[in-house]
Image (spheres, rainbow, N blue to C red):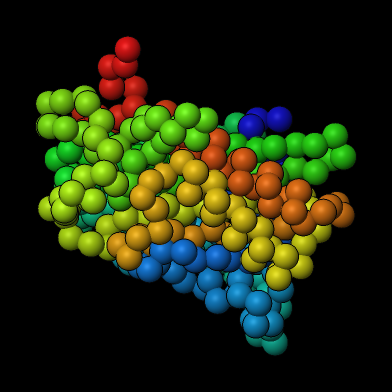
Amino acid sequence: MFNAITDIDGIKVGHAANLEGFTGCTVILCEDGATGGIDVRGSAAGTRQTNSLESQHFVEEVHAVLLSGGSAFGLDAGGGVLKYLEERGKGFPTSAAKVPIVPTAIIYDLSFGNHKIRPDKEMGYMACKGAISGEIEEGSIGVGTGAVIGKAFGMELAMKGGFGTASRRLPSGLVVGAAVVVNAFGDVVNNDNNEIIAGARDSEEGHILVNSFEQIKKGVTSKEEFFQDTTLGVVATNALLTKTEAIKISQMAHTGFAKTIFPIHLTSDGDLVITLSTRKLKAEINIVGLLAEEAIIEAVKQAIMAADGFGIMPAYKDIVRD
C-alpha cells in the first residue's frame, strides 16, 4: 500500500510540468478500462469528454482521466493522452478505429506563472509515458504545479495549493483511493478540529491565517476576477459499480471537500469529482462512498502539506506555527 490512488490494481498516475510557466497536468490511466461517473458542484467547470460519465451517455467505459492546468487552453493536453492510448490499442471500438475516452478537467493557474505557457498535447503525452503504479509524488507537481488557495484577498495574500492522494483498504479486499488538486478560493481546514491550516493571510509579509468566510460576511471581496478557483477530485475503486453508482460515489465524495475546504462550491469554482470503477469486487455502495469521502479528506490535506511555493508565495511548510 502506498496510501495513493495507485493502490487500486490497474490504475497508474503520471505527472508532467513546466517550471517556467509553473503549470502542468496529471493523468490517471485505467489499464483495463473503467466504469466512470461524475458529479459537478462548481458553477465554472472547464471540461472535455465528461459527457461520457453522465448516466444518459451510452459509452460505458473510460480509459483515462486527465487533470490539467492552463484553464481552457489546458484541455489541449488531452490530445496527447488520446495519442498515447491509441498507440497502445486502447479505446472505444468503431468501424474505423478505436477512440480513447479521456474525460478531462482543468484548473485556472494562469495567474501564478507565465500565462503564455500552458499544458499541451506533448505534455499530456509525457504524463502518460511517466505514469507509474507505485508511490506518487505530491504537492506542487503535475496539475498541482500552479495551484493556489485562499484567494479572498487576491493572489498577494494567498498560499500555495497542490496535488495529493490517499487510499483506504478493508479486510474484504475493497480498496478506494482518491487524487485531488486543490486550487480553491477558500481556506483548507483540519477536519478533526476545524482549525485553518492554510489559506488567506493577513498581509504580504505576514503568516497569520485569516478566516475567509468571516471576512466575506463582513463585506470583503477578492481583488481577483472570478472563475479562477477549482478543486478537482478523482476517486478510484476496485468495487464493481454501474455508471449510476459511480455517479453516487462522486456525490458522496464531495463531502470530503466540504469538510476540508471552506468556503467551497462557489459560483467562481469549477469543483467536480470523477469516480472510476475497475469492476473487480462486489461491495456495498454506501461503504464505498464513505471510504471515498475519507480518502478525499486525506488527499486534500496531503496536497497542502506537500506544497512548494517555489519562492513565489508561502506554502504550508513555510508558515510558522506555535
Q: Residue at x 40, y 59 (%)?
A: 265
x, y (%) of residue 220? 15, 50
160 above or below 153? above
Number of numbered labels in the structure image: 0
Q: Residue at x 53, y 71 (%)?
A: 50
The quarter of the image holding the N terminus is top right
x, y (%) of residue 251? 59, 60
Is residue 179 in view from this perspective?
no
x, y (%) of residue 298? 55, 35
Q: Residue at x 35, y 60 (%)?
A: 266
Taking the view exactly as shown, the residue that stands out farthest to the top is 322
**Front-lying residue, 290 or 130:** 290
**Front-lying residue, 199 or 50:** 199
Q: Residue at x 55, y 51 (%)?
A: 255
Q: Is residue 196 left or right of residue 211?
A: right
Q: Is residue 10 left or right of residue 73?
A: right
Q: Is residue 170 left or right of residue 315?
A: right
**Front-lying residue, 138 or 230:** 230
x, y (%) of residue 46? 39, 67
Is residue 305 in view from this perspective?
yes
